[in-house]
Amino acid sequence: MIVRLIIRRLFFLIFVLLGLSLITFTLSHVVPSDPARMIAGPRASPAAVEKIRKEYGLDQPLWRQYVRYVSGLVRFDFGKSLTSRRPVAEDLKRYLPATIELALASMLFAVILGIPLGILSAVQRNSLLDLFGRTISILGLSIPSFWLALVLQFILFAQLGLLPDGQRLPIGVKEPPPVTGLFTIDALLAGNLPLFFLALKHLVMPSLVLGLAALAIVTRMVRSGMLEVLGQDYIRTARAKGLRPSTVILRHALKNALLPAVTVIGLQFGLLMGGAVLVEIIFSWPGIGRYAFQAIQNFDYNAVISVTLVIGAAYVLVNLLVDIAYVLLDPRIRVT
């Protein structure tokens, strides 16, 4: 059943990517701009601009440019970046792991703290702990990430000197041998613990900023799910049988309470991937968020479309994982 679900979603992914590519390509070319002129510079001669236009195929009709781009996608060829002059696939390989590492760290921060806080907040309803959990939820959703980033940089970097203000590693420090592209994982694989802790230290502040909103949502969803489940008859029956409170909560209540939270966690991971732009700019984090921002500024069509496709594919794949988690958590749910 799960295999059939995976095959169907992967087939569906093809149409999602085609639709995304068509919409993004159309919108990118509707904007009145001349990328060839931007690449050549304001003082370039018309001949030089025309040469660049031919080099990148910008002189061809739009439909032909789109067909050429889509046919290249079949071979995982995302075209050539107008800004970096490198293949976009090479740029994605360079920048994507940084964003994945940041999004994973943010999601771990939200899940590891949000689920226990949501459970405790529901179990001890109207207590000080519940008040703390609800306050975290409100603050997490209301504090702008750029403001929080600046405040943390001022306190933790400028005043206390506890954490670095940005970048994945200090300037001059050699990166770990690339395996996954995630510096923390690659440092562990290389057995270099000092480098692991150094990369982790650089990851803490941006992941806190990026993950705070996700923490607030996870806490709220787990709390509301637990409150609903704790009022069910089977929970009262379990308590009447004399089961320990921890057994009732962790074995009987949490499994059902997590179902709506799993959906939110999956959607949040997709949002973290796509919404990391501001955090990456503030912390000088070399991810695809900052890459996409620069691409939009320079009308770099191929880069913009490719980043959109990557994030769209991430959404579909994460939703697939959410559906699989649903089936595993509650076998009564049938895959349709």
Image (cartoon, rainbow, N blue to C red):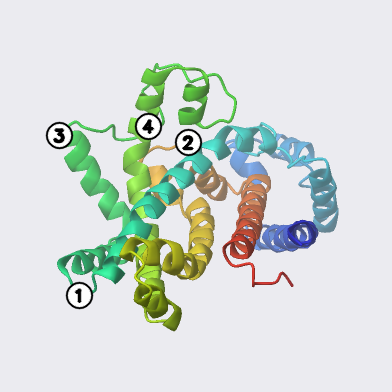
Residue denoted by label 3: 160
Marks 2 and 1, how far apart at CA: 43 Å
Q: Nearer the viewer, residue 222 or 180?
A: 222
The x and y percentages for residue 299 are 60, 49
Residue 128 vertical position relative to residue 298 in the rendered view, above or below: below
Question: Which of the two labelled residues, at mark 3 and mark 1, occupies the earlier sequence position?
Answer: 1
Neighbours of disc 1 within 10 Å: few (<14), some (14-19), many (20+): few
Image quadrant where residue 220 sits: bottom left
Task: Answer whether labels 4 and 2 touch (C-beta < 8 Å).
Answer: no
Separation of residues labelled 3 and 4 (CA atoms) = 18 Å
Q: Quadrant of the N terminus?
A: bottom right
Is label 3 or label 1 in front? 1
- The residue that label 2 is drawn on is 286
Name the residue rendered at 41%, 25% in the picture: 196
- Closer mark to the observer between disc 4 and disc 2: 4
Which residue is the extreme one toward the front?
241
Give the SS element for disc 3: loop
Query: Which residue carries the number 4 mark?
Result: 200
On residue 126, which mark appears? 1
Q: Helix, strand or loop at disc 1?
A: loop
- Spatial distance from mark 2 to mark 3, Cα to Cα? 25 Å
- Amino acid type indicated by mark 1: Asn
The answer for how far apart the CA atoms under marks 3 and 1 are is 35 Å
Q: CA distance from mark 4 to mark 2?
A: 15 Å
Mark 2 or mark 1, whichever is nearer to me: 1
Q: Quadrant of the C terminus?
A: bottom right
- Disc 4 marks which amino acid? Leu
In this rendered view, identify the residue nearer to me: 30 or 109.
109
